[in-house]
Image: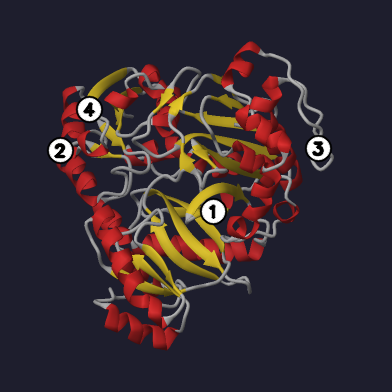
Amino acid sequence: MFKKILIANRSEIAVRIIRACHEMNIEAVAVYSDADRNALYVRMADEAYYLGMPQPSESYLNMDKIIDIAKACKAEAIHPGYGFLAENTEFAKKISDSGIVFIGPSPQSVKAMGDKIHARRLVKAAGVTIVPGTVDPVPDVRHAKKIAKDIGYPFMLKAVSGGGGKGMRLVEQASDVESAFERASSEALSAFGDGSLYIEKLIKNPRHIEFQILGDKYGNIIHLNERECSIQRKHQKLIEESPSPVMTAGKRSKVGAMAVSAAKAAGYYNAGTIEFIMDDRGELFFMEMNTRLQVEHPVTELVTGIDLVKEQIRIANGDRLAFKQSDIGLSGSAMECRIVAEDPLNDFAPTPGRIAYLREPQGAGIRIDSGVYEGFEVPGWYDSLIAKLQAHGKNRQETIARMQRALSEYRIVGISTAIPLYRWLFKHERFIKGDINTGFLEQEMDGFTKDASQLWIMAAIVSGMSEMSNHKTIEAPHNEANGSKWKTAGRINNLR
C-alpha cells in the first residue's frame, strides 16, 4: 500500500481525503495557495507545501509544480479530488509519465468520457439509451438550425468539453439560435479552451439521476445504486439523495446495468458516475460521465457502507474489488445539502469573508464534511462550497426529519450561506412528497423570497454579528405561518 499521497486540491474534499489516508496509515501531503495558508486541510495534513498566488492558474491548476512537489516529498500517488485538474487528461498523463500513480481512471478513459460527443457515441454503441441529438459537433449556426428542424424546439446547446453548466444554452425558437450559439461557444472556449458544441433535445422538467460506479484494473465493474440530484440552480446541484424516491428495484437493476455497460465501453476503472435524466414517463437517458469522485459521494457511502475514497486508493494501488454486485445493499435513506457561501436572497451572490461564529450540528444520523472553522477567512477565489451536511435515516421520512433538525442547529455567522433556503425547502410539501425535478427551484423560488420578506427573517438579516457574539436577548416577531416565538439573538442570527 502507498505510504504517502499528495492531495492536489483544497477545502472540504482535501479534508475528506486526508481522513481516509490517516485511517489507512498513509501520510497525507497538502498543497496550498496564499489564500489557503491557514486552511483546515493544511493544518490536518502531515506535510504541506506552498503552490503560489491565489489565482487557480498560479496554484491549483499548476500541473508541473504539483508534480514537482510530489516528487520532492516522495509521494507515491496523487489524488485530484474533484474540480480543478480532476478530469484533465494532460494532468493524468503527466502524473503517470512521471512514475507517480494517478488516483483515478486511465488518461485514455478521462479523454474518452470527457469528450461529450465521443462519450455519446461510445455508450450508444454499447446499447445505452442517449438523449436525442447529435453525435458530432455542430460546426455553425446554419447547421444548428437545420438540426433543430429535425429534432424540434426547444433544445440545448452544450459544450463538447463542458461541465458545471458552462457553455450551455437553452434555445426555444429559431430566432434565438444565433445568439445562443455564439454565447455558448464563447463561454466554452473561455472555460475549456474548446468552443465546439453539440445539440441535445430538451427534456422538460426532468429528474437528474446518476449511478455511482466502481471498477478495478482487472475489468471488474459494479454500480453502487443511484443518487437523485434534481434540486439544482443553473445546473449546479444543491441537494442530493439516495435512493431516488421514484426508483424501483427493477428499474435500478436495469439502469445500473446500463451504467456498468457504459463504464466498460470506456475501459474504465476507479470511481466514476454515469449521469442520466428521467423524463415524465420514467424513461432514463444517458447524459454524461464524470470521471472522478463526486461532491455528493457521501450519500452513497451512507446507504452502502462503502468508503469510496478508500476504494479509490486501493484500486489505484492495484487491488481487486473486494465485493461483487450482489454484495451491494441499500441501507435506509441519505441526503446531502451543499453548504455554499452564497446569499440566496441576493441571487446567490458569493459571500467570502471571516466566519465569526460556527456551530455544526451533530447527533444521530448526521455527518459533516467541512473545510472551515470559526475564525477562518473564506476566500473569494474558488468555488463557494465550504461544507456538506448529510443526514441518514431508516427511510426518507426519518432522513428529512433529521436534516430539518440538523439545519435548525447549524450556526454560521459572518458570511451568508444557503442554510435558510434549505430550512424552507425541507418543509416544502412538494419536496417532502418527492415531487421534484431540475426546475423545482425556478418554479418555487418565489415562495422562498416571499417567506424571506417576512419580518422575522428580515430581522435575522439585519440583527448583526455582535448580537450573536454577546448572546444579547432581543425580541423577535411572532409569525403564525412559521410558528416562530424566537427570543434570542443566537436563534435569530443563525439564519444567515
Contact flag, marks 1 and 2 (Cβ < 8 Å): no
Q: Which residue is mark 2?
A: 98
- Alpha carbon distance from label 3 to label 2: 63 Å
Quadrant, the C terminus? top right
* Amino acid on which the number 1 mark rests in the picture: Gln
Please tell me whether residue 492 is drawn above or below residue 207 in the rendered image.
above
Which is in the foreground here, disc 4 or disc 3? 3
Disc 3 packing (10 Å; few <14; some 14–19; many ≥20): few
Quadrant, the N terminus? top left
Q: Which mark is residue 51?
A: 4
Q: Which mark is residue 479?
A: 3
Q: Earlier in the sequence, mark 1 or mark 2?
A: 2
* Amino acid on which the number 3 mark rests in the picture: Asn
- From the top left corner, tell me how far across and down residue 106 is, in percent: 27, 50
* Left or right for 222, reference 29: right
Contact flag, marks 2 and 4 (Cβ < 8 Å): no
Residue 268 in view, yes or no: yes
Q: Earlier in the sequence, mark 3 or mark 2?
A: 2
Q: Which mark is residue 232?
A: 1
Q: Based on the displayed image, in which of its 4 quarters is residue 391 positioned?
A: top right
- Alpha carbon distance from label 2 to label 4: 19 Å
In this view, the residue in front, 180 or 149, is 180
Which is in the foreground here, disc 3 or disc 2? 3
* Left or right for 68, reference 217: left
